[in-house]
Image: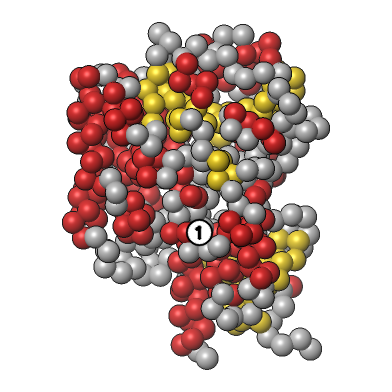
C-alpha cells in the first residue's frame, strides 16, 4: 500500500496548482487530480476556431497575475512564463472617436480623461503609487488574517474600496472618467452601485500603473503550465483525466484541498447543505474570433491596447449589468474585449489576429447574444464583421460545461452581492476550512475572489500547513 500523502488537491486551476506548490515547496507530499486532460482551469489556451489561432477560453489578460504576491515568490519565469506588455493596458473608446486610457503612466491616463478630471484622478490614485506590493499583500487576502503591512494605506484604501463605484464617480465631472471607472468596476460582474465595487475599480487601476495589464507569451495556458512544472520540480505530482465524484475515490491523505465550486465540494466531500446559502451570479456570453486583420477601431488608442472596454457611459454600463443580474438580456451589453495577438504574434498565423469578447447575461440563459454583441462592436469598430474568418460562441451552458466551477455560467464562481462580496463563501474565521477537519476549499469562491493570481490557493495552503503541523 502506498504511503499516505500529506495533501491531495482536486482541480488544477491556478488556485489548485498554487496551493499544491505552496505545500510541496515546504516539504509536504502532494498530488493533484484534474478531470480534464490538461491543467489550467480558467487559465487555458486552445485552438477554438481555426488551426493556428490560439485562444484563451476564459482569462486572457492578467493584471493581478503579474502583480500577485504568490506568483512573485515563485520562479515561474524559469518554468516558461513570460509576460508581454501591450503599448496601452486599456482603452475605453467613445462614439466621437476619442478614448480614455489606462496605462503605466499616470499622467497619460489622467490627461486622457480631460482637464476637468485629470487632477481628480491623480488625487484618487496618488496615495498608493509606488506601494503596490503593500496594497496587494493587504487586500488580496482575508481581512482578518493578520495586521496590515501598511496600516495607513490599508485604512485609506479600505474606506474608498467599500463604497459603490457610483459614489466614487462623484469625484469626476466628465463622462470619460465616470465611464472608465464604471468599466473597471464592472469586472465584479455586478451593478456598479453595489458594495465594494470601488475597490475592484481602484485595484485594477493601481495594478495597471504598477505592473501593467500583460498577456503571457503563448496564451494563459503558460501560467498553468509554469505552475505545474514548478510543482513537479518541488516533488509534487499531477494526474489529469481523473474526474473525482467521491472523497473515497482519492488516495489516502492527511488533507484534501478543493479548487472547485462550493456546490461541488459539498457533493464530493459529503458536506450536505453546508453551502446552500452560497449564491452564484450572472453569466458571461463569450465569443472568440479568428480575424483576417486587426480590429478597425475608430479610436486610435484602442488599436494598440491589450484590453478594450465597450460601453461608453457609466449609465449604459450600469443598465447592462443591472439587466443581467435582474434576469434580462441587455439591449446594449457592456463588453470586455482583449486582443492578445497585437503583442503576441504566436497567437495567430502571420497577418491574422485573435480577438476575444464577452458581455453579461442572466445565469443559465440559453439565448444568443451574438448579434447584440456584434452591434456594439460595430459602433466602435465599423466593418469589423468583414474581418471575421471564424467565431467560437460560448453562452452560459457552454461555459458551465467547459469549466465545472462556472456554475450556471458564472465565471466568478460566486456573486458579488451583499455580504458575500467580502465574506466568501460564508462567514468563518478560516474561510478555507470546512466542517470536515481534513477538507479545505481553495477556489475563487474564497478570499480574495476571482482572478488568475493564485492568492486563494496561497491562503488555503497556509491553513492546510497549519493544520498538518498541528497534527503531526
Quarter of the figure with residue 50: top right
Q: Is residue 115 visible?
A: yes
Q: Mark 1 sits on what residue?
A: 71
Q: Quadrant of the N terminus?
A: bottom right
Q: In the rendered picture of this protein, how many numbered marks are placed on residues?
A: 1
Q: Position of residue 180 (x, y in %)?
A: 36, 27
Q: Is residue 358 visible?
A: no
Q: Position of residue 109 (x, y in %)?
A: 33, 29
Quarter of the figure with residue 220: top right
Vertical placement of 175 versus 472: above or below?
A: above
Q: Position of residue 239 (x, y in %)?
A: 75, 66
Identify the residue at image location x=23%, y=34%. 122
Q: Nearer the viewer, residue 100 or 76?
A: 76
Q: Is residue 455 left or right of residue 1?
A: left
Vertical placement of 409 versus 431: above or below?
A: above
Vertical placement of 420 versus 100: above or below?
A: below
Identify the residue at image location x=58%, y=56%. 77
Q: Is residue 349 left or right of residue 223?
A: right
Q: Nearer the viewer, residue 252 or 420?
A: 252
Q: Nearer the viewer, residue 38 or 444?
A: 38
Circle 1 residues within 10 Å: few <14, some 14–19, many ≥20? many
Q: Position of residue 222 (x, y in %)?
A: 65, 50
Amino acid at each position: 500500500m502506498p504511503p499516505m500523502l500529506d495533501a491531495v488537491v482536486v482541480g488544477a486551476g491556478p488556485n489548485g496548482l498554487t496551493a499544491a506548490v505552496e505545500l510541496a515547496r515546504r516539504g509536504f507530499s502532494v498530488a493533484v487530480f484534474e478531470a480534464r486532460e490538461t491543467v489550467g482551469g480558467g487559465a487555458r489556451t486552445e485552438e477554438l476556431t481555426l488551426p493556428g489561432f490560439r485562444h484563451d477560453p476564459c482569462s486572457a489578460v492578467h493584471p493581478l497575475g503579474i502583480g500577485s504576491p504568490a506568483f512573485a515568490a515563485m520562479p515561474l519565469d524559469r518554468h516558461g512564463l513570460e509576460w508581454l506588455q501591450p503599448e496601452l493596458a486599456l482603452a475605453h473608446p467613445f462614439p466621437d472617436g476619442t478614448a480614455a486610457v489606462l496605462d503605466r503612466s499616470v499622467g497619460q491616463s489622467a490627461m486622457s480623461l480631460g482637464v476637468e478630471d485629470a487632477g481628480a484622478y491623480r488625487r484618487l490614485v496618488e496615495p498608493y503609487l509606488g506601494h503596490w506590493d503593500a496594497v496587494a499583500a493587504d487586500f488580496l487576502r482575508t481581512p482578518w488574517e493578520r495586521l496590515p503591512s501598511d496600516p495607513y494605506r490599508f485604512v485609506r484604501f479600505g474606506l474608498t474600496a467599500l463604497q459603490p463605484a457610483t459614489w466614487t464617480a462623484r469625484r469626476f465631472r466628465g463622462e470619460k472618467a465616470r465611464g472608465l471607472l464604471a468599466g473597471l468596476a464592472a469586472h465584479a460582474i455586478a451593478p456598479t452601485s453595489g458594495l465594494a465595487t470601488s475597490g475592484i475599480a481602484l485595484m485594477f487601476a493601481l495594478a495597471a500603473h504598477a505592473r501593467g495589464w500583460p498577456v503571457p507569451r503563448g496564451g494563459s495556458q503558460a501560467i498553468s503550465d509554469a505552475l505545474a512544472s514548478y510543482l513537479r520540480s518541488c516533488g509534487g505530482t499531477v494526474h489529469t483525466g481523473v474526474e473525482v465524484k467521491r472523497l473515497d475515490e482519492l488516495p489516502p491523505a492527511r488533507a484534501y484541498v478543493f479548487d472547485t465550486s462550493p456546490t461541488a465540494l459539498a457533493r464530493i466531500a459529503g458536506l450536505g447543505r453546508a453551502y446552500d446559502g452560497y449564491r452564484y451570479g450572472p453569466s458571461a456570453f463569450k465569443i472568440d474570433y479568428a480575424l483576417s486583420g486587426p480590429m478597425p477601431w475608430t479610436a486610435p488608442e484602442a488599436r494598440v491596447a491589450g484590453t478594450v472596454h465597450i460601453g461608453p457611459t457609466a449609465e449604459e454600463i450600469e443598465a447592462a449589468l443591472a439587466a443581467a443580474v435582474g434576469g434580462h438580456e441587455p439591449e446594449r451589453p457592456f463588453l470586455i474585449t482583449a486582443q492578445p495577438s497585437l503583442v503576441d504574434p504566436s497567437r495567430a498565423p502571420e497577418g491574422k489576429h485573435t480577438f476575444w469578447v464577452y458581455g453579461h447575461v442572466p445565469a443559465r440563459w440559453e439565448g444568443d447574444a451574438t448579434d447584440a454583441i456584434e452591434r456594439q462592436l460595430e459602433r466602435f469598430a465599423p466593418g469589423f464583421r468583414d474581418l471575421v474568418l471564424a467565431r467560437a460562441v460560448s453562452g452560459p451552458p457552454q461555459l458551465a460545461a467547459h469549466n465545472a466551477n462556472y456554475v450556471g455560467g458564472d465565471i466568478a464562481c460566486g456573486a458579488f452581492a451583499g455580504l458575500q462580496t467580502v465574506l466568501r463563501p460564508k462567514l468563518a474565521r478560516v474561510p478555507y476550512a470546512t466542517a470536515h477537519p481534513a477538507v479545505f476549499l481553495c477556489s475563487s469562491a474564497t478570499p480574495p475572489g476571482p482572478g488568475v493570481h493564485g492568492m486563494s490557493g496561497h491562503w488555503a495552503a497556509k491553513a492546510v500547513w497549519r493544520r498538518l503541523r498541528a497534527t503531526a
